[in-house]
Image (spheres, rainbow, N blue to C red):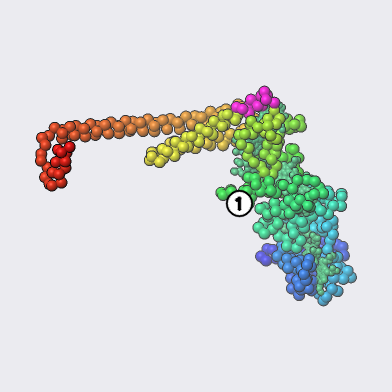
Amino acid sequence: MTPGRKIAALAFIAALVLVSAGPAVYPARAAEDPASSCVSCHAKLGGKLGPPAREFPLSVHREAGLTCVTCHGGNPALPGEESMSPKHGFRGKPSRKQIPEFCARCHSSIAMMRQYNLRTDQFAEYRTSIHGKLLFERNDPGVAVCTSCHGMHEIRRKSDPKSHVSHSNVPATCGRCHADAAMMKPYRIPTSQMEDFEKGVHGRILAGKIQGKNPNIAPNCATCHGIHGATPPGVREVANVCGACHSAVVGYFRESAHFTAIREGGGPKCVTCHGNHSNRKPTLQVFSGTEQGECGSCHKPDSAALDFARNAQSLLGNLDNTINEIQKDLVYAERSGRNIEKLKQELDNARYKVTEAGPVIHAFAIERILPIVQEADAHIRKARQEIQDFQAELQQRRKVAAYAVSMLLLIAALLWVKLKLLPKASPPGEDNQGLNSGTDGG
Ligand code: HEC
Ligand code: HEC
Ligand code: HEC
Ligand code: HEC
Ligand code: HEC
Ligand code: HEC
Ligand code: HEC
Ligand code: HEC
Ligand code: HEC
């Protein structure tokens, strides 16, 4: 424990004594007592009774000076099960329904938490979540309580990579219930969220599967649903939730007829087109398709909207195709040893413009896309010019080469004629003689 932490722990224990006015005044002396009968006995027990004693030493609570007795009561100085007598304040374990308030006793106390710089709204938020509502209003113990997400005794800081709630571990923590078909059956909600999420861009970045992308920039389940107030985000929140990171997209989206239509109750939201958990980037097919989330699923064939869709598809599709073609020419030019710097630059500029179109498309207005397409086109034209120059140069070289070859052939032919015209000299050597005689004979 660092000196700072030690002071914090001592201050915490003092605060505990001050704050807990009830019968439970926690005996601070057991704080670091390895001879605690609770630990020595439980560490030897099997089943559910052993893990608390083995896991607790790894927890943030142990570091803060809490002991078994702080939460469960009893007297660790007494040997045997006498230590667990209600006479000594032993309370046993809280029921599932009691757990949130049990943890909140400390975590909602500003006086206690201030020194650790921890928020104190977890319980208040939890009560507003679907989990909290079902627990308190319908007595449903199947929902998540504090220990479902944080663990029972091995509770770690959220910054600890081994914590169940560290940024990258959250999907598995929620998925333990939400991906379990048997557990979710009574509620009749889908159980595909974790699988979809893991396949999508966000999930792959979070799991470190996309090279060069920092997992901390991707959302996890709690980023979108709220950490303690886990509720599906409403319509307005969705644009806000996504907009926290995709601000450029949302900026254009707010200009669109869709944004107005959402407020009137019928337009497509981010998740209509992108899915809520897979968050795929649509291919250009979305413009001509009629499946759910594709433009044709809402718009009639002769509408202005599908006019826009057709234009956008053909403009963006042409840009893609042209850039791919030029890329092939570029590879060819590079192999033949030309200086392709300028060509490369123009192609990169064109590509960059196309990526700008990604967010801009969300204005769903042709006058927003056209300028980008025109700028991309200008770069493409310059790139094409480069290629034409290469080709002209190539043709020039071919002409020169062809001329050189024909000249050489001409010289060879002249030489041959000249050789033919020379008077025959009798060749030396037997073999030649034999040949000659053979020819003569024929
Ligand atoms: C000699 C061994 C021993 C000692 C010492 C001991 N326990 Fe236990 N504890 C047990 C056993 C055995 C059980 C299961 C008893 C049962 O199910 O009735 C148990 C049960 C528990 C439970 C679960 C109760 C429940 O409601 O399910 C808690 C919590 C607990 N002990 C905490 C403590 C604490 C805190 C101390 C120290 C103050 C302590 N124990 C000391 C053996 C021990
Ligand atoms: C921060 C408070 C806290 C501390 C400290 C703590 N416990 Fe617990 N313990 C709990 C809670 C809450 C539960 C019930 C968890 C649940 O049901 O999800 C529990 C459950 C238990 C159980 C029952 C396990 C089961 O699966 O039924 C035992 C036994 C137990 N604790 C023993 C201990 C021992 C021994 C220590 C000290 C090494 C300890 N606890 C320290 C809060 C605490
Ligand atoms: C549905 C899962 C879930 C439940 C239920 C839950 N938590 Fe959390 N908790 C988290 C996650 C995820 C984080 C990490 C937040 C982050 O990365 O900022 C967290 C963070 C915390 C923190 C660290 C400080 C903070 O607020 O960022 C504390 C303390 C905490 N929770 C206490 C509680 C208490 C007390 C309860 C019960 C009233 C509870 N939690 C219920 C998931 C949960
Ligand atoms: C007796 C008071 C007390 C109780 C009861 C208690 N805690 Fe804590 N908890 C603390 C203190 C103090 C810290 C701060 C430790 C630190 O930062 O060094 C803490 C820290 C935490 C953290 C780490 C916060 C972070 O930095 O990310 C989590 C998570 C947490 N508690 C969850 C729980 C849960 C869940 C329960 C109920 C099972 C619970 N606590 C019950 C006092 C308590
Ligand atoms: C202990 C199991 C469990 C854990 C862990 C858990 N949940 Fe839940 N969750 C439930 C149950 C049960 C429901 C109630 C289903 C219903 O009727 O809506 C629920 C409801 C929800 C809902 C509302 C669904 C709807 O449309 O009705 C959301 C959103 C949600 N959970 C998100 C999360 C997130 C995010 C996490 C992790 C940070 C998480 N849950 C962890 C069990 C769990
Ligand atoms: C990028 C934001 C985002 C992330 C990340 C995210 N969700 Fe969702 N989730 C949503 C949206 C949006 C909805 C749909 C809300 C609506 O239709 O009103 C939703 C719906 C849900 C529901 C309700 C049932 C359903 O499928 O419609 C559950 C349960 C749920 N999410 C759990 C999770 C879990 C578990 C994770 C992590 C594995 C997760 N979510 C990650 C945005 C997200
Ligand atoms: C915590 C930040 C964050 C939140 C919140 C978030 N995203 Fe993302 N999203 C990212 C990051 C980071 C990427 C990866 C961008 C990249 O590749 O550079 C991404 C990628 C995407 C992509 C794929 C883009 C591509 O080029 O393949 C789509 C689609 C997407 N997000 C939609 C959404 C939607 C819809 C929501 C709200 C329901 C949302 N995002 C919420 C951070 C976030
Ligand atoms: C009507 C359908 C539709 C809606 C609604 C929609 N998008 Fe998109 N989104 C698309 C299409 C189509 C593309 C692909 C454009 C392309 O191929 O360049 C895209 C691309 C993206 C990308 C990738 C952008 C890039 O840089 O390549 C992100 C991120 C994104 N959308 C987020 C969002 C968010 C956030 C919202 C809500 C504010 C949203 N989208 C609403 C259809 C939609
Ligand atoms: C969930 C239904 C839905 C989907 C899917 C959808 N739209 Fe729309 N769209 C609307 C509504 C509602 C309006 C506003 C009423 C209207 O103008 O038809 C609208 C309006 C428009 C407008 C303005 C039309 C005008 O008359 O000015 C354009 C352009 C548009 N959408 C393009 C698209 C494109 C492109 C796609 C596919 C990428 C798409 N929409 C997908 C529902 C949808």
Q: Specify whether 81 is left or right of 441.
A: right
Q: Secondary structure at mark 1?
A: loop
Q: How far from the left and from the top, in percent, is residue 110?
A: 78, 55
Residue drawn at the location 76% of the way across and 73% of the way down: 44
The quadrant of the image that shows the C terminus is top left
State the residue lying farthest toward the top. Answer: 302
**Residue position marked by numbered label 1 in the rendering:** 208
Which residue reaches farthest right?
87
* Residue found at the very far bottom of the displayed protein: 79
Q: Is residue 113 above or below residue 265?
A: below
Image quadrant where residue 264 sits: top right
Residue name at image x 84 percent, y 61 percent: 94
- Mark 1 burial class by Cα count in 10 Å: few <14, some 14-19, many 20+: some
Depth check: give the residue in front, 260 or 27.
Answer: 260
Query: What residue is drawn where x is 53% and y is 37%?
Result: 352
Q: Is residue 398 magenta?
A: no
**The N terminus appears in which quarter of the rendering?**
bottom right
User: Is the C-beta of the residue carrying label 1 under 8 Å from the nearest atom of ligand 7?
Assistant: no
Of 9 and 438, which appears nearest the observer?
Answer: 438
Disc 1 residue type? Gly
Residue 185 visible in rendering: yes
- In percent of width and height, residue 394 lies at 36, 33
Q: Nearer the viewer, residue 139 or 3?
A: 139
Q: Is residue 13 above or below residue 182?
A: below
Along the viewing direction, whichever of 112 and 248 lies nearer the viewer: 248
Name the residue at 80% across, 46% down. Answer: 188
For the stretch drawn in magenta, what is the main secondary structure?
Answer: helix
- Magenta residues? 300-311
Q: Quick check: can you spot residue 363?
A: no
